[in-house]
């Protein structure tokens, strides 16, 4: 577990012990009411949450958040596990953190529900396949080696179709209304009953961050190719697009080109290339909580959850393809630095 996660947990316990309850409950509301803003308020200001990228290690963020919510449940004497959407005014997520954020804030799940759903998604998406057919019957080592070696002949080890199908199932089962469930992955990311959620992705061909939001964004961004395209089409962003765009990590998932049919398009890569920890984007977006011209919003609590550290193994497999990918990535970073 990363030091930042440990520090976050300690800070949370410190807040609780001192009696400055940043998660004070004003009323208990049923899920059916589904308010667009948290059902709870705190007099000292809004509560913000950042969720890192980190692949399947993202489950760690959910486990930590589940513990936080259960502590709130005990402290407040609640009968049911409280939902993060009722305790955080704004959240930002990148890659797997973006997917987790969607479960918690677009679909208003509890942390426990999100853990179960995330586990189901991960098992399907990361299951070794060839041409869409599972090969796990070969055993873990062989199937993993075969899957990793796919990088020799193609750009990604995992196909985007598996991710699409997983998103379709989640929206069909957990959509907020009939339109969500009917449209499935094509349902719009923006929804009046969703919690305020920011998904970070990277406009690779522009070397810029692109933000996709579950709420109306009326900000006037500095003019650029990426910002102009996002401004023109942001109301048409779907749940499936946002999920694929934030998690399109090179060698793992295919890049995403958008908008379809438009003359000017953006190529999205994983948001972690520029914002693996999205706290900067979260902090800058706090002004979305107030109307233009109003004072800066008060913030009572910021929680940033990481996904731990993964030991780097020696390079292996698919050296020819990986060399090409690394060259592309390095060219991207050099372009960004310029």
Image (spheres, rainbow, N blue to C red):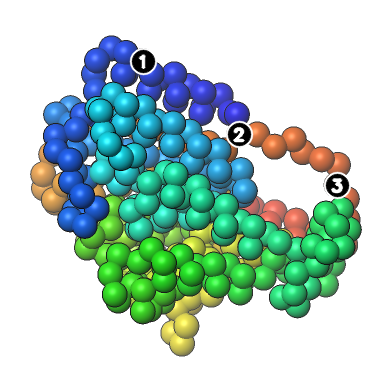
In primary-sequence order, the first of circles 1 and 3 is 1
Q: Position of residue 242 (x, y in %)?
A: 45, 65
Q: Is 43 on the left-hand or right-hand side of 11?
A: left
Give the residue pinned by disc 3. 315
Q: Residue at x 77, y 38 (%)?
A: 312
> In this view, which residue lies farthest toward the top?
18
**Which element type, helix, strand or loop, lies under badge 1?**
helix
Q: Position of residue 293 (x, y in %)?
A: 11, 48
Q: Give above or below for 256 relative to 53.
A: below
Q: Residue at x 38, y 23 (%)?
A: 12
Q: Residue at x 29, y 75 (%)?
A: 178
Give the residue pinned by disc 2. 308
Q: CA distance from mark 2 to mark 3?
A: 21 Å
Mark 2: few/some/many CA within 10 Å (<14, 14-19, 20+): some
User: Which of label 2 and label 3 is nearer to you?
Assistant: 2
Q: Position of residue 216 (x, y in %)?
A: 24, 62
Give the residue pinned by disc 1. 14
Assign the N terminus to one quadrant of the image: top right
Picture quadrant where residue 107 is located: bottom left
> In this view, which residue lies farthest toward the front?
79
Q: Give above or below for 268 relative to 62.
A: below
Picture quadrant where residue 322 is located: bottom right
Q: Residue at x 26, y 33 (%)?
A: 78
Q: Nearer the viewer, residue 199 or 127?
A: 127
In primary-sequence order, the first of circles 2 and 3 is 2
Q: Give above or below for 314 relative to 325.
A: above
């Amino acid at each position: 577990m990363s030091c930042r996660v440990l520090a976050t947990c300690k800070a949370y316990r410190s807040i609780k012990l001192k009696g400055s309850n940043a998660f004070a409950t004003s009323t208990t509301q049923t899920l059916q009411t589904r308010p667009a803003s948290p059902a709870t308020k705190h007099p000292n200001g809004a509560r913000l949450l950042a969720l890192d990228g980190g692949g399947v290690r993202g489950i760690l963020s959910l486990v930590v958040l589940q513990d936080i919510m259960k502590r709130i449940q005990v402290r407040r004497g609640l009968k049911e596990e409280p939902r993060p959407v009722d305790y955080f005014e704004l959240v930002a997520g990148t890659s797997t953190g973006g997917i987790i954020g969607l479960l918690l804030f677009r679909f208003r799940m509890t942390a426990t529900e999100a853990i179960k759903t995330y586990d189901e998604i991960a098992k399907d998406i990361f299951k070794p396949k060839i041409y869409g057919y599972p090969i796990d019957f070969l055993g873990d080592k062989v199937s993993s080696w075969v899957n990793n070696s796919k990088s020799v002949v193609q750009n990604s080890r995992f196909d985007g179709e598996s991710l699409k199908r997983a998103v379709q199932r989640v929206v069909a089962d957990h959509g907020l209304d009939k339109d969500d469930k009917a449209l499935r992955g094509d349902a719009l990311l923006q929804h009046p009953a969703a919690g305020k959620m920011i998904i970070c992705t990277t406009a690779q061909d522009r070397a810029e961050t692109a933000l996709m939001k579950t709420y109306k964004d009326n900000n006037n961004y500095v003019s650029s190719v990426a910002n102009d395209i996002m401004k023109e089409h942001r109301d048409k962003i779907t749940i499936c697009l946002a999920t694929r765009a934030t998690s399109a990590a090179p060698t793992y998932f295919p890049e995403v080109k958008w908008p379809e049919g438009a003359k000017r398009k953006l190529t999205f890569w994983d948001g972690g290339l520029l914002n693996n920890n999205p706290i900067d984007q979260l902090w800058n977006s706090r002004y979305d909580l107030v109307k233009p011209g109003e004072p800066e919003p008060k913030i009572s609590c910021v929680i940033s959850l990481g996904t731990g550290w993964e030991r780097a193994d020696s390079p292996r497999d698919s050296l020819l393809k990986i060399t090409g990918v690394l060259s592309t990535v390095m060219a991207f970073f050099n372009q960004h630095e310029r």
